[in-house]
Image: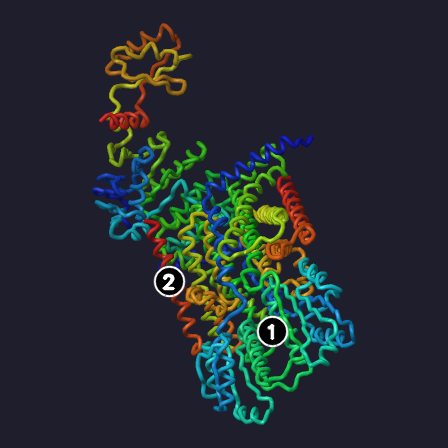
Amino acid sequence: MIPFALVQLRALITKEFQQIAADPRLLRLLIAAPVIQLLIFGTAVNFEVDVVPTAIVDQDRTSTSRAHVDELMADGTLVRALDAAQPDDALAAMDHGDVAAVIVLPEGLDATRLRHRPAPIQIVLDGTDVRRSTVAASAASRYFAQVDAPPPAIRLVPRILSNPTLDTQPYMVPGLAAMVLVITTTLITAMGLAREREVGTLEQILVSPIRSPVLLTGKVLPYAAIGLLDTGLALGAGSLVFDVPMRGSLVFLAVATMLYLLSTLGAGLLVATVARTQQQAFMGGFFFMIPAILLSGNMTPVLAMPKWMVPVTYLNPLRWFIEILRANLLEGSGFRELWVHLVMLLLIGSTLFVTALLRFRTKLG
Amino acid sequence: MRFSPGRFFRRVMAMARKEVAHVRRDAGMLYLAIGMPLLLIFIFGFGVRFDADDLPVVVVDEDHSEQSDALIEALTASGDLEMVEMAEDEPAAELALRSNRAVGALIVPHGFGAIRQRGGTGEVQLLVDGTDGTIANMLLANTESLVLATSLREQRVMPAFAVSVSTRYNPAGESAMFLLPGTIAYVLALVSVLLTSLAVAREWERGSMEQLFATSVGTLEIVVGKLLPYLALGVLDVLLALALGALVFDLPIRGSLPMLALGSLLFIFGMLGQGLFISIITRSQMLATQLGALSAMLPSLLLSGFLFPTDNLPLLLRAVSVLIPARYLVALLRSVLLKGGGFLDVWQDLVGLLAFALVTVAASTASFKRRIA
Amino acid sequence: MSGRGDIEVDHLRREFGKFVAVDDVTFQVPRGEIFGWLGANGAGKSTTIRMLIGVLEPTGGDALVDGISVRKDPFGVKRRIGYMSQRFSLYPDLTVRQNMAFFGGAYGLSGKKLNDRIETVARDVDLTELLTAKTADLPGGTRQRVALGTSLLQEPGIVFLDEPTAGVDPVSRRMFWDLIRRISGQGTTVFVTTHHLDEAEECRRVGLMVDGKLVALDTPAALARDHVPGTIWRARAVGIQAAVPLLVGRPGVLDVQPFGSELHVRVDGLPKEMLDDWLRPRFPDLTLEQGRATLEDVFLAVVGHQEET
């Protein structure tokens, strides 16, 4: 004899899958979309600023100045996009957005050197993109500092652990997977319950002897399964296409993913207890998702946030999960290093879930 | 049927009035339209920055000499690197990295002082945690320039060049200046596409769309009438975002206001058309949101130049980004707001936006007609 | 059907803040009865039902439904009853069988037992050939039958039908009531609310709520006798409506109501011959038949009386 609640749970889950199967477009969206998004955006994310279109104003016009320009461009960071006779022409091109840097080489480079005085080099940068102007400035300064200089007093010997070439994908793609997952799981749960309310089937369930924990579990489990499947697909695609290593234990990864899903689905449920319509559910889900994604530390590091904002990120399940993914995949970390993260995910997830449950109950009374 | 502008206008307005009533009844939509710019401006203005001070590092001093002390002092005094702890040896430092207590380790090897006393090149090692490449790059660049500066100071030689760097448009180098114009475009993309696709998909779900076909209102009239109120919300969002940007983050408006208005209007129209198109092909709120998020939320963030320069994209995606309208608005806004751009600076962007608006409104009108037939 | 199949309501009360929605209501419904529960909107009808099905907790009194206290064990009550409302919503994107399987599962049915019950119920409500149809494609009346069948899956001793025929065409309504009689014939108690007072005549007994109080409870005939005094004559003739001014105000005439093509004349001890004498000259084709007060008359009389006091 199967316990009563399990029969109910099975009925709920079967029904949810039948509904998903009844709309193949939804199924496609749930399974295929995350992978496709991951592939596209995995290719798009690239933090390395490798090209800065540059205008050269060579007022010296000697073989020396031409040699400097060639060497300056040699590593490919600064790319010569314009030769201007006057600085003003170059600045106009910058206004128009054609170049992001202007380098002015003054007349008489050789003569100045003979007098043992430093030759003045002017660099003008487009400051709108801070990263790009930083890269351009340091490329140019580095070059001009080493010209004709004796061997340096101190040299830096860097060694990079776990991602020696600092490719963007290995550390961004896991985070992207987490982001894509939040869209699928939080929104679908929130809207799914709101849809039952709109159609009226929720009321029907509420008069049946299904208790609310069983109902919410039955509502969440199918999407947890889909989320887990999505994660598997995303990580598979990540390691095949973007060479994301998988150095950690898969069991640990599965446990962490489930804890993460507990919080994204819990957030979806909580939203659903507030929303009366799908539209409201969507908006609620959205106001959870946007800050969660943008303040997750994936796009821009948590370290770069203002100090007062850092504690806020402790409440963000995405932040913990992204750190878990990076540490597990790239460094092979497991329970020993990341137990705090798991505990945080568990806390956030169960708080959301329990709050949703309580709200759900009181709203019915 | 002969086209009469007067009647067209009256019907459009009637449709628009009905839609306004919808929006007003649905307070949630207004929350989204007003809350979203507030939230995003706040996040991008305060929370998203590309530069970090005080990168936490561990220091391992194997040399214990006067020179090594001086070097460590020079590297950690600037505020770019913050020494969080001293470690005994390299394995201890690595452990600190793996447990996320620090992002890098400076190691001054044994014999550094002796080499420096002989006038040789002393080497200092930097162990970098590569799990967050953004931080790793920052750490590398900061440390490299610190070491370079220290090295030059110790050599006391006259440099061959005196390089003076000046930065235009955003001399303080604030990330907010870079991000806020893009944020406006992003807010518009989200609000416009998602609101329309949701609102209209709901009408499909409830069957009120079919009723509309039964009347003699023309397709284009329906399309334009449905879009007008959301256009107004979009304009409200632009004004709200600009005001907030100016008040809280000193975001300037240096260029042509008409260009700003024209560009924003064209963009909103295009995105509304996209939302309408999605709702027509999905006719389900759940699908519409997923498709809306798929087609507006992430591309406008990642392929528009908002966060990553489009020049950096791989060739194929750079071709795709030409089709992302946010790309043109981001460029236009940066030019007008920060660089004082006028028509001559932004006309290409306007053409891109106009083309997109025409295509989406035409596409949604056409697919509408197919639905009715 | 192992339970007692009856309902015992004992001083049931429900307040919302200061508002008393259900005020000290007491009644019993024996097993197998079709019991009608009537009242205007806001009279406390729905609140009563929601307490009886274990969804809303009473603030006073109690009710035993199938022998189980709605206060102490609302989930026990939920498990033992069937419930169907006008808003009964099926999943439009699922088939009839999938819907039934889901709600059957909600009541703990599974496996062979569930399948057998679906087949049986589908036969009972004449839906066998529609089991694989998508619910969204069914007309309203058919959907109501699916809903009724669904609420019978777990073989409840009592079914609560809350406005089951709202928005359904007259033909479907008649079919639906045939089903209700069939269910009751099988020993299931039926507790039904309805807007259609002609339907309520089908009930064995009827309870009437006004402003949260149960003001009348009996068989429809007894209610008519008690609340609508006098005799009703149904006058039929060509153009009989023109007779209203002839009758109103005459001694012994209590009430004159046009009723379709007839005129209902309620009189107090006035002999039939007198009525005939008054009307025959103007309406030579007149027929007079004795009628019975409808529940509508009762309803108007009772509500009118309550409002006066």
Which residue: 76% across, 64% down? A85
Residue B135 vs C82, above or below: the answer is below
Q: Secondary structure at mark 2?
A: helix
Question: In the rendered image, is residue A307 in sight?
Answer: yes
Asked whether B135 or C92 is in front, the reply is B135
* Tag in front: 2 or 1: 1
Residue closer to the observer: B74 or A295: B74
Estimate the x, y position of residue C35 in percent, counting from the top left: 30, 37
Chain label for disc 2: A
Q: Residues within 10 Å of mark 2 (few under 14, many from 20)?
A: some
In the figure, is residue C16 to the left or right of A204? left
Q: Vertical placement of C64 versus A47: above or below?
A: above
Chain ID of residue with mark 1: A
Q: Amino acid at mark 1?
A: Asp
First of labels 2, 1 by sequence position: 1
What's the CA distance linking mark 2 and mark 1? Answer: 37 Å
Q: Secondary structure at mark 1?
A: loop
**Which residue type carries mark 2?**
Thr
Residue shown at 21%/42% (left/top)?
C11
Task: Please say if A180 is above or below A278.
Answer: below
Say above or below: B70 vs A280: below
Q: Quadrant of the N terminus of chain B?
A: top right
The image position of residue C188, as x and y in percent, is 32, 43
On the picture, is A209 further left or further right than A127?
Answer: left
* Residue holding disc 2: A351
Single out the residue that lies furthest toward the front: A115
Can the viewer see residue A24 in this picture? no
Rendering coords of residue A208 (x, y %): 36, 50
Query: Residue A167: which numbered mark, if any?
Result: 1
